[in-house]
Image: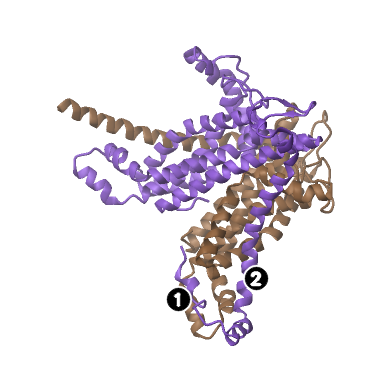
Chain colours: A purple, B brown
Amino acid sequence: MDSNASAIGSAPSPWTVRSIRRRLVSGDEVAHIVTLVFASFVILIASLLINELWVNCVLSRHAFGWHFWFSSEWDPVFEHFGALPFIYGTIVTSAIALVIALPLGLAAATFLAELAPRTLSDTVSFLIDLLAAIPSVIYGLLGIFIVVPLMRTMIGPALKSVFGFLPIFSGPNYGVGFLTAGIVLAIMVVPYIISISREVLLTVPRDQREAALALGATRWESTWKVVIPWARTGIMGSVFLALARALGETMAVTMVIGNDPKIAASLFAPGYTIAAVIANEFSEAFGNVYRSSLIELALVLFLITFILNGFARLLIIATGGGSPS
Amino acid sequence: MNLRLTWRKSLNVFMLTLTGVAALAVVSVLFLILGYLVWNGWKSLNLDFFTKLPVPVGEMGGGMANAIVGSLKLLLLAAVIGLPMGVMAGIYLAEFGGRTYGFTIRYVTDLLNGVPSIVIGIFVWSIVVAPMKTFSTFAGGVALAIMVIPITLRSSEAFLRAVPTSLREGAMALGASKWRTILTVVLPAARGGIITGMLLALARVAGETAPLLFTAFGNQFWSPGWKQPVASLPVMIYTYAISPYQDWHRQAWAAGLVLLAIVLIANIGTRIVLSRGGVRSV
């Protein structure tokens, strides 16, 4: 990672008093230290963040302990709090998002990397990067006014008439709920999967493809059996990044999930996620235990995405793919 | 054997077509989204939107002048706090950073970049809002600044690294010290890229809603100074979209269009400048 640029000027010199004084006078050490201080702010912010979350949820940790994780009660009046419905909602919506986005994204990335001419591929990737830049509140706005009505009038009834015998597609359909949130999330994470997977697929050496084709494989067989397995680790990285984003997404989900702390088997039922409950209730949470419980939820969300992100970066670094931004 | 070959060939055509359809589907969603938003937003947009304050529930009309100014103030704060820190840290990583410490900072930066924005909101609430005992413009600016730092840091590092080593060597061969080389040779060479990175970072946080919910909070009138709650475009879109009022929905669409225009113009503009200016290798 380090270019040779950083080696210049910091050549090992003996730490004699004279050399230190000379370097201080020339200003190099000063510049080094000043920029170092600024860089260290990043680490300071990260550690302060963890510390603040940990310290501020002490009330809830003491009051509920591990029970917090397995209780599905959420009662601000009597101050009984459990995280289960929110964890359930977060996992279910993210899972739906990945089930939709992964095949779609991977297929589109394959098309862009393997089949499309370079100019078309670059243009489409540019458009898809723009899709990733759209603020989440705008996805929420479109979710409320496009996806929710569609869900109520078309997608929901269609799914019901075909798969209505399954418990996950039964029950009343209000338009808002797990499935709607999952669909909106899928639209939001698909650009991430496409753009990272495409980059990783493009790094697969040309001779791998040529060898497969020379052995008589069709274009699809060489893609499916050679190129994609080669890029597997990087693609996994893109999935983890997408998952981390889906788990932490707040506004779009809050606007379409129905905000009801219940665990329901039906995907049509309204639910709640960790991020959504924080967004909705934090500024009105006047009880100390109430607020502390919400902060504990934030801590958990932070830790989950922290671990997923770390894992994803390692995978992408391991395959030498580009860094997403 | 022949049957098997036919099967393999048709599977080939079928699956390859499917990948094309998937790509087409994703791109058409983009145009559908943009088209619907532009159509609805354009219908709802008028001069009042930019010049008037929000009106109480039940009255028609009004605008979001306070939210537009509020968003600008928040962005200004984020820029003043976040950009210099990001660039300075980027200089450290590109020019001084050692192997271990450099890697650590880079890794923590990426992780900070991935923290859900709602968590940043809680964090700033506990370090700024709780001690000050009030929601404020300042708190909102700090929240956005924390999101600006990692983005600016990584982009400025990348652009500084793209400056050829020979330029540094040339300056040093002429007797310039390292910090003079950075200040007068390396930074000017990477200037275009660094400014681009700053703009992209600001464009990204301009649309952030979650970190502002309990820092800047929002209100319905002008907010002078920095110590009061302040309205912002994204939070207004959220509040208006989930409200039951028809006229508020109309304004939410208008605000959505304005926000989208800002974000897309910043993104497309900087990308065009990037591809023309020959500043590559991000």
Q: Nearer the viewer, residue B165 or A93?
A: A93
Inspect this view and state whether residue A133 appears: no
Task: Give the numbered dot on residue A34.
Answer: 2
Point out the frontmost of discs 2 and 1: 2
State the mark number for residue B141: none
Q: Are marks 2 and 1 on the same chain?
A: no
Type of residue at label 1?
Ser
What residue did someone put label 1 on? B166
Report the side of A22 relative to A284 (left or right). Answer: left
Instruction: Please report the residue visible at 67 percent of the width from the left and 47 percent of the height from the top.
Output: B120
Whole-percent x, y for residue B111 in the image: 57, 50
Relative to A218, B29 lies left or right = right
Residue reaching furthest to the bottom: A18
Q: Which chain carries label 2?
A: A
Q: Judge the density around disc 1: few (<14), some (14-19), many (≥20) Cα neighbours within 10 Å.
A: few
Gap in Å between the C-alphas at discs 2 and 1?
25 Å
Residue B61 visible (yes or no): yes
